[in-house]
Image: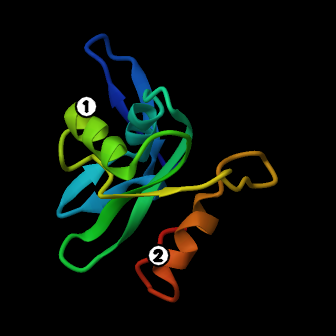
């Protein structure tokens, strides 16, 4: 049980899509954060993006992006990803930062980025 989520192609090869703990469940839809991060970083003005779920009263979670970029607005990031991936997968909100925090292993520290949104909620994902 690795915690990885994958899919098989038509030839039977398995491809890892994302980590289960990073998946956002919004209104009953599963959103893979790696897919959204890839779409956001297609935007020329974006240097880096970290995507995760934040609490939403009606949907359980909503897709949120933390972005390192210059010369682009929240509305432009949302519009591009909505056109590219559809409304369910597009971030509903974007925070711009100078840099994304890293773990000791050099990976994006999603847990640290999620913490201010979830506080003491029992719904927080590790």
Q: What x and y, as percent, mark residue 9?
A: 30, 18
**Residue position for label 2:** 124
Answer with the quarter of the image where residue 115 lies: bottom right
Dot 2 falls on a residue whose secondary structure is loop
Q: Is residue 43 above or below residue 104?
A: above
Nearer-N-terminus badge (2/1): 1
Q: Residue furthest front?
A: 71
| Camera-nearest residue between 75 and 6 | 75
- State the image coordinates of residue 94 (x, y, percent, origin top left): 42, 56
Which residue occupies 41% across, 24% down? Answer: 14
Q: Which dot marks residue 84? A: 1
* Numbered badge on residue 3: none
Q: Residue at x 48, y 26 (%)?
A: 44
Q: Which residue is drawn at 42% across and 37% down?
A: 40
Q: Which of 59 and 30 is in front in this view?
A: 59
Which corner quadrant holds the C terminus?
A: bottom right
Instruction: Tell me if mark 1 has few (under 14), some (14-19) or many (20+) residues whose alpha carbon lies within 10 angstroms of its own.
Output: some
The residues bearing labels 2 and 1 have C-alpha atoms spaced at a distance of 28 Å
* Residue 21 position within the rendered picture, expressed as x and y whole percent measured from the top left: 47, 58
Q: Is mark 1 on a helix, strand or loop?
A: helix
Q: In the image, residue 43 lies at what x, y percent?
A: 43, 29
In this view, the mark in front (2 or 1): 1
36 to 15, vertically: above or below: below
């Amino acid at each position: 049980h690795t915690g990885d989520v994958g899919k098989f192609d038509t030839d039977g090869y398995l491809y890892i899509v994302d980590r289960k703990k990073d998946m956002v469940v919004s209104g009953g839809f599963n959103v893979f954060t790696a897919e959204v991060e890839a779409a956001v970083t297609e935007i020329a003005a974006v240097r880096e993006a970290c995507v995760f779920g934040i609490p939403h009263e009606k949907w359980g979670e909503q897709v949120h992006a933390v972005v390192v970029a210059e010369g682009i607005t929240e509305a432009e990031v949302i519009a591009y990803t909505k056109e590219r991936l559809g409304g369910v997968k597009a971030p509903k909100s974007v925070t711009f930062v100078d840099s994304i925090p890293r773990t000791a292993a050099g990976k994006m520290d999603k847990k640290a980025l999620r913490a201010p949104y979830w506080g003491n909620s029992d719904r927080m994902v590790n």
